[in-house]
Image (spheres, rainbow, N blue to C red):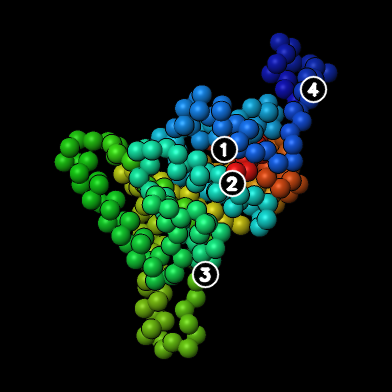
Amino acid sequence: HRDLHSFPTRRSSDLLVKRLPKLPTIVRYRDVHAERKKQGLGNIALGADLITGKPVFLPFKDMMHMQIAGVSGYGKSTFLQSLMLQCLQLGDALEKISVIDLKGTDFKALECDKLEVVFQYEQITNFVAQLVAEMEARLTVMRNNSLTNWPRGRLLVIIDEFAQLVYQLSDPTLKDAERKKHKAIQEKMIADLCRLGMLGRAAGITLICATQKPTTDAIPSALRHNLDAAIMFRSSRILASSIFSDTSGFIFEPKDLPKGQAIAWLNGTVRYMQSYVV
């Protein structure tokens, strides 16, 4: 790729060509586990950098609210599985992983004492309300003890296909009063999730929202503005621009990304990576 900053001169003829590393079609987590142990299990291996071939690590303690985007079948679920299984190795740094998944199928096999899958709609709305109550209780403890961040294990909340929560429709056979009640419950749940996006991280609650189309009608703007990290698998350039305001400098075309490859926005930097398969 072009890297004119490597040269002391500014002549247009100066061009550095770097050969991209030859990565296998599937990059397995087991191949990087030893390196992760060396770095410390508190670092999550997100994927192999497409430019350097080296692992892309993200400290769990520094993990921001995140959005995962991309068309179906190109790596979102595989990435989330890798993320969950690595987080389960964190010990006391992780209190619990809660997965909101209306299908209830993709992550059910991962359930254990530290990972639950919430899939029934009524169960989801109650869970989100309880999560906000937990956040408020933690913030009260922090205020009373002059703390700026939650000192104990973090809660990781993963929402798969967020748009399904937004577009979940009530039973058409219900009477008007019941439909209005359903809509009010739905609107409160979305408002609660937006509040978690604004205040949750300081209280030890991290949100990860996955969707096929990261648009304002799929994820409310009040929440999207607080999703400070992003990983985007294959997608159109138009949808990519909803995450990355400037797509003109991309080395890889979003619509041509092979399965498992993604463009990431991490700590203010664009990274290109191939996610690990566990």
Q: Is residue 104 left or right of residue 235?
A: left
Label 4 SS? loop
Q: Position of residue 16 (x, y in %)?
A: 78, 19
The dot on residue 167 is 3
Q: CA distance from mark 1 to mark 2?
A: 8 Å
In this view, the residue in front, 199 or 24, is 24
Instruction: From the image, state whether disc 4 or disc 2 is nearer to you.
Output: 2
Q: CA distance from mark 1 to mark 3?
A: 30 Å
Disc 4 marks which residue? 17
Q: Are marks 1 and 2 in contact (CB under 8 Å)?
A: yes
Q: Quadrant of residue 214?
A: bottom right
Q: CA distance from mark 4 to mark 3?
A: 47 Å
Q: In the picture shown, does residue 93 fall above or below 243?
A: above
Q: Are marks 2 and 3 in contact (CB under 8 Å)?
A: no
Upstream in sequence: badge 1 or badge 2? 1
Disc 1 marks which residue? 46
Instruction: From the image, state whether disc 2 or disc 3 is nearer to you.
Output: 2
Q: CA distance from mark 4 to mark 2?
A: 30 Å
Upstream in sequence: badge 1 or badge 4? 4
Query: At 69% across and 33% down in the image, what residue appears?
Result: 50
Q: In the picture shown, does residue 146 fall above or below 139?
A: above
Q: Is residue 206 left or right of residue 257?
A: left
Q: CA distance from mark 1 to mark 4?
A: 26 Å
Query: At 35% across and 62% down in the image, what residue appears?
Result: 127
Q: Residues within 10 Å of mark 4 (few under 14, many from 20)?
A: few
Q: Is residue 195 left or right of residue 40?
A: left
Query: At 42% across and 81% down in the image, what residue appears?
Result: 179
Label 2 SS? helix
Label 1 SS? strand
Residue type, numbered disc 1: Leu
